[in-house]
């Protein structure tokens, strides 16, 4: 069998998409006879009739319908190959790796990735999610080009940082938890006597002192999703990003705990970070700037 050409497949797609050989010819800027010939040669090479020509307009045959998705995929991959090769030739990265702290709003991350795909369609993002110092560690050791990190990032001289978000933290518990049923403000003796669920840092050498820990009984875990599930189950109380528990508070699955020791406007700053000595490519630079531009928007 003769080798199929990408041009033949493009003509096949144009004829299928535009509904006629004449319309495909106009779209491709060719004569109708050239389009008809390209389709005919393709049919001869695959030994199949791709279009039923018995009616007023050619209609895809069963074989044509079966082969159309494959042809579309091949043409798309060739287009992506050329786009990536052009990008690499001009210094654009093939991949940008981003580590995101689990506290960062997922809706804002998705917004950034949609914009990134539109701007850099040939560049593949790799997204890693971790917590606290463990997320910063991935940027420090070069596993990730960029990070969206908690305040630890601002304390590391190796990192260049830009403000990316301010996360409101709220103390919560399940409605059946004893603290949720305690009348009035919760004083230190109330908080101290109940298990507090505390997010812990896998990168112990980067972890700072405990912040917001009031209880003498703590359960420590390194996954925010697990902490959320344990709070819903009533296994303890603890602080959570407000955007992650907004629906739970509205539905009554969790309640916010009133305490003079917990600032109701307590904010956790987040930072876009990268190594000062890193040579960021244009796609990574664009993503860092875009993430920083989202600072201040409501998640």
Image: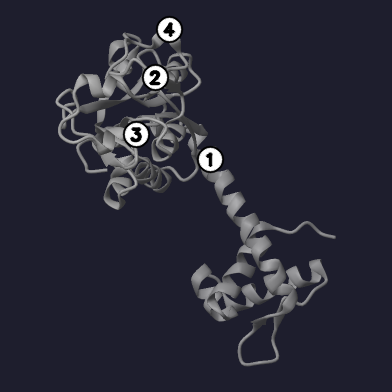
Q: Position of residue 166 (x, y in %)?
A: 23, 31
First of labels 1, 4 by sequence position:
1
Name the residue tied to disc 1.
Answer: 84
SS of the residue at dot 1?
helix
Residue 13 appears left or right of 271 = right
First of labels 3, 1 by sequence position:
1
First of labels 3, 2 by sequence position:
3
SS of the residue at dot 2?
strand
SS of the residue at dot 3?
loop
Q: Is residue 279 above or below residue 70?
A: above
Name the residue tied to disc 3.
Answer: 104
Quadrant of the image containing the C terminus: top left
Kindly give the residue lying farthest to the right in the view shown: 1
Quadrant of the image containing the N terminus: bottom right
User: Which label sits in the foreground, 3 or 1?
Assistant: 3
Residue 81 appears left or right of 163 = right
Name the residue tied to disc 4.
Answer: 205
User: Which label sits in the foreground, 3 or 2?
Assistant: 2
SS of the residue at dot 4?
helix
Name the residue tied to disc 2.
Answer: 218
Residue 160: quarter of image: top left
Q: Position of residue 266 (x, y in %)?
A: 19, 28
3D distance between C-alphas at marks 3 and 1? 30 Å
Q: Residues within 10 Å of mark 1 (few under 14, many from 20)?
A: many
3D distance between C-alphas at marks 4 and 3? 22 Å
Q: Residues within 10 Å of mark 3 (few under 14, many from 20)?
A: many
- Judging depth in this view, the residue of 27 and 284 nearest the camera is 284
User: Which label sits in the foreground, 4 or 2?
Assistant: 2
Q: Residues within 10 Å of mark 4 (few under 14, many from 20)?
A: few
Q: Is residue 116 above or below residue 276?
A: below
Q: Is residue 104 above or below residue 29?
A: above
3D distance between C-alphas at marks 1 and 4? 39 Å
């Amino acid at each position: 069998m003769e080798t199929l050409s990408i041009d033949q497949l493009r003509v096949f797609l144009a004829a299928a998409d535009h509904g006629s050989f004449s319309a495909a010819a106009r779209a491709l800027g060719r004569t109708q006879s050239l389009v008809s010939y390209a389709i005919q040669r393709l049919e001869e090479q695959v030994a199949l009739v791709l279009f039923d020509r018995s009616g007023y307009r050619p209609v895809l045959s069963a074989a044509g319908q079966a082969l159309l998705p494959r042809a579309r995929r091949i043409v798309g991959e060739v287009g992506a190959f050329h786009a990536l090769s052009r990008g690499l030739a001009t210094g654009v990265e093939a991949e940008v790796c981003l580590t995101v702290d689990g506290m960062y709003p997922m809706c804002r991350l998705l917004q950034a990735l949609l914009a990134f795909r539109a701007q850099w369609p040939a560049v593949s993002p790799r997204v890693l999610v971790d917590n606290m110092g463990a997320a910063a560690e991935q940027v420090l050791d070069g596993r990730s080009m960029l990070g969206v990190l908690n305040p630890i990032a601002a304390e590391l001289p190796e990192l260049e940082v830009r403000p990316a978000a301010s996360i409101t933290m709220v103390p919560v518990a399940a409605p059946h938890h004893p603290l949720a049923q305690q009348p009035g403000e919760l004083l230190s003796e109330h908080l101290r006597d109940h298990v507090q669920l505390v997010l812990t840092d896998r990168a112990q050498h980067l972890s700072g002192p405990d912040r917001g820990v009031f209880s003498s009984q703590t359960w420590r875990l390194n996954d925010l999703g697990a902490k959320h599930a344990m709070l819903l189950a009533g296994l303890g109380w603890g602080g959570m990003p407000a955007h992650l528990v907004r629906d739970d508070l509205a539905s009554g699955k969790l309640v916010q705990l009133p305490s003079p020791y917990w600032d109701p406007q307590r904010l956790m700053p987040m930072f876009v970070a990268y190594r000062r000595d890193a040579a960021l490519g244009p796609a990574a630079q664009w993503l860092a700037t875009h993430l920083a531009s989202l600072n201040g928007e409501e998640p």
